[in-house]
Amino acid sequence: MINLLPKIQKEELEKEERIKIISILGIIFFAAILSFNLILLVLKILSSNKLEIQDIIFQQREKELEIYKIKDREKEIKKYNLLFSDILNFYQNQIDVTEILEKITNLIPENANLKSFKFKPLVEKDFIAEIFLTGFSPDRETLIKIKENIENEKSFDQLNFPVSNWASQFNIDFSLSFKIKK
């Protein structure tokens, strides 16, 4: 193609063409930068959402772990509470044998004495223990006094005083048994 235009017009046309090319390239460059910025913005939003989701999941798992720890502690506390209640029951159900022995020795007159004392705990409804005693009485009157004292004690019941205790009048080896009420 032959260009018959004067040189000035040719230069103007070339100038216009360069301006068009530069403006197209500028628009393309601007569009590319804008697209790149929009892509970066979308990536930022997506990554922040994923980060927030991961943070929420982490917090939920942390709470679950705390719940498991709390449940483990609750189990441990329950175990110790059972142990302590068993220990408390054990101590509350203890029978003070020294108190019973002291009560018995107060019921025995001074001129008589005990030779043996046997304590047998009971699980009966109305009684906590059974006592077996053997002893020495110088005479029958002291033996009668021992029997009366034990019969008159309100916490003692079901006195068993064998007939063989009455066989001798002096220097009597006696035996007896009774139950202690609750």
Image (cartoon, rainbow, N blue to C red):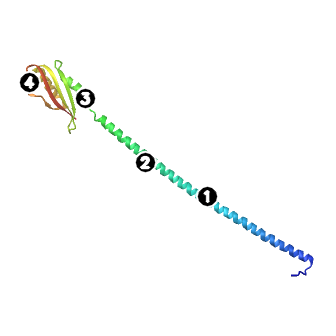
Give residue 48's mark.
Answer: 1
Q: From the top left corner, tell me how far across and down residue 14 is, in percent.
A: 86, 74
Task: Work out whether 29 lies above or below 95.
Answer: below
Mark 2–mark 4 distance (CA, rounded to whole Å): 69 Å
Q: Position of residue 182 (x, y in %)?
A: 22, 35
**What amino acid is labelled 1 in the image?**
Ser
Q: Residue at x 14, y 28 (%)?
A: 176
At label 3, the amino acid type is Val
Q: Nearer the viewer, residue 1 or 131?
A: 1
Mark positioned earlier in the residue sequence (2 or 3): 2
Q: Is residue 159 left or right of residue 92?
A: left
- Please report the residue visible at 45 percent of the width from the left and 49 percent of the height from the top: 68
Q: Which residue is mark 3?
A: 97
Name the secondary structure under disc 3.
helix
Mark 2 is surrounded, within 10 Å at the Cα level, by few (under 14), some (14 to 19) or many (20 or more) other residues, namely: few
**Mark 4 closeness class: few <14, some 14–19, many ≥20 residues within 10 Å:** some
Give the amino acid type for the residue marked by disc 2 in the picture: Lys
Q: Amino acid at mark 4?
A: Trp
Ranked by sequence position, the earlier of labels 2 and 1 is 1
- Nearer the N terminus, badge 2 or badge 4? 2
Q: Secondary structure at mark 2?
A: helix
Residue beneath disc 2: 71
Residue found 58% across the figure and 58% down from its top: 50
> Residue 136 is drawn in which quadrant?
top left
Q: Earlier in the sequence, mark 1 or mark 3?
A: 1
- Disc 1 on helix, strand or loop? helix
- Evaluate if marks 1 and 3 touch, with contact meaning CB atoms under 8 Å apart: no
Tell me residue 146's x, y (percent).
15, 24
Q: Are marks 2 and 3 in contact (CB under 8 Å)?
A: no
| Number of the front mark, 4 or 1 | 1
User: Callout 1 environment at 10 Å: few (<14), some (14 to 19), or many (20+)?
Assistant: few
